[in-house]
Amino acid sequence: MQNVTVIGAGTMGNGIAHVFAMHGYTVNLTDVSQDALDRAMMTIERNLDRMVKKELITEKEKAGTLANITTSNELKPSVRNAELIIEAATENIGLKLKIFEQLDEWAPSRAILASNTSSISITKIAAATSRPSQVIGMHFMNPVPVMKLVEVIRGYATSNEVTRTVMDVSRKLGKVPVEVNDYPGFVANRILMPMINEAIYTLFEGVAGVEEIDTVMKLGMAHPMGPLQLADFIGLDVCLAILRVLHDGFGNPKYAPCPLLVNMVTAGKLGVKTGEGFYFYKPGTKELEVSGNFKKLNA
């Protein structure tokens, strides 16, 4: 396997493209937006520069990685020669089903069709194709170049051969693949999202403030990042989408999103990506400042 196509040039897509290209794969990164592709390539180059500065890679390896990536804003030619296709588009079931219908039509018959979805059923995605045995989940963690885990999600019809291949490819990327079955939220988000939601409820109910909640979890539970800061990092819109998948999939009220989370997403306060969530995010600084709304709430 040599030719990989990554669909979606956002945070996850550019990270996935970076890792595959750095390990010698030929990568076609595709997105409908040329601006997104341009930003993705700048991000990849900036991250590679950091690696060079830390002496993790050489300038020659950086150049080779960039040379392994081509970009395109047309899906059909991007998948023509692909052996592995990884969809990393927005966490929207309608969009994903449409993409997989197109992949089924345009991709080579032996190509493996993978989704980086963090919660949506692989079995449902596979049902949009005529080759469900070749559809699988490859859930990378953010930031992709740093995080070791890949959740490998078997749909109802995913074959043993495809699962073995994806596990092997993940190891070649220096990752640690963990095979899980296809149920809402898989493992990572089935456990993580209720914790984040409960942290938001704890704030919503006035039990403690933003910094206090995060400090308890960092110092008391040895978490490297508090749950509210982590929610900002993931994206509050993404957290809300995953919680809705869990709530719909299990029908259990414990997965119901906190009203505060719903309101923040409605107001466009999505975390790091918009510069404000539970904290403010100022370019060029790593210092955290609690969002003004919560300063008032806790005053």
Image (cartoon, helix red, strand yellow):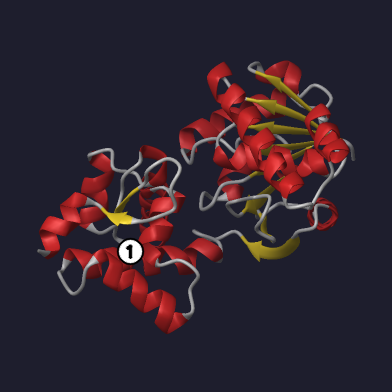
Image quadrant containing the N terminus? top right
- Decide: is 231 above or below 21: below
- Decide: is 223 above or below 158: below
Horizontal arrangement in the rendering, residue 195 relative to residue 51 (left or right): left
Question: Residue at the spot x=39%, y=52% of the render?
Answer: 232
Q: Residue 288 occupies which quadrant of the picture?
A: bottom left
Residue 76 location in percent, x, y?
A: 70, 18
* Depth check, front residue: 205 or 294: 294
Question: Residue at the spot x=18%, y=74% of the render?
Answer: 207
Residue 127 visible, this orientation? no
Question: Residue at the spot x=81%, y=42% of the render?
Answer: 22
* Depth check, front residue: 154 or 157: 154
Residue 209 location in percent, x, y?
A: 22, 68
Horizontal arrangement in the rendering, residue 158 relative to residue 240 (left or right): right
The residue under label 1 is 197
User: Does dot 1 land on a helix, a strand or a loop?
Assistant: helix
Residue 45 visible, this orientation? yes
- Amino acid type at image mark 1: Asn
Residue 84 location in percent, x, y?
A: 79, 38
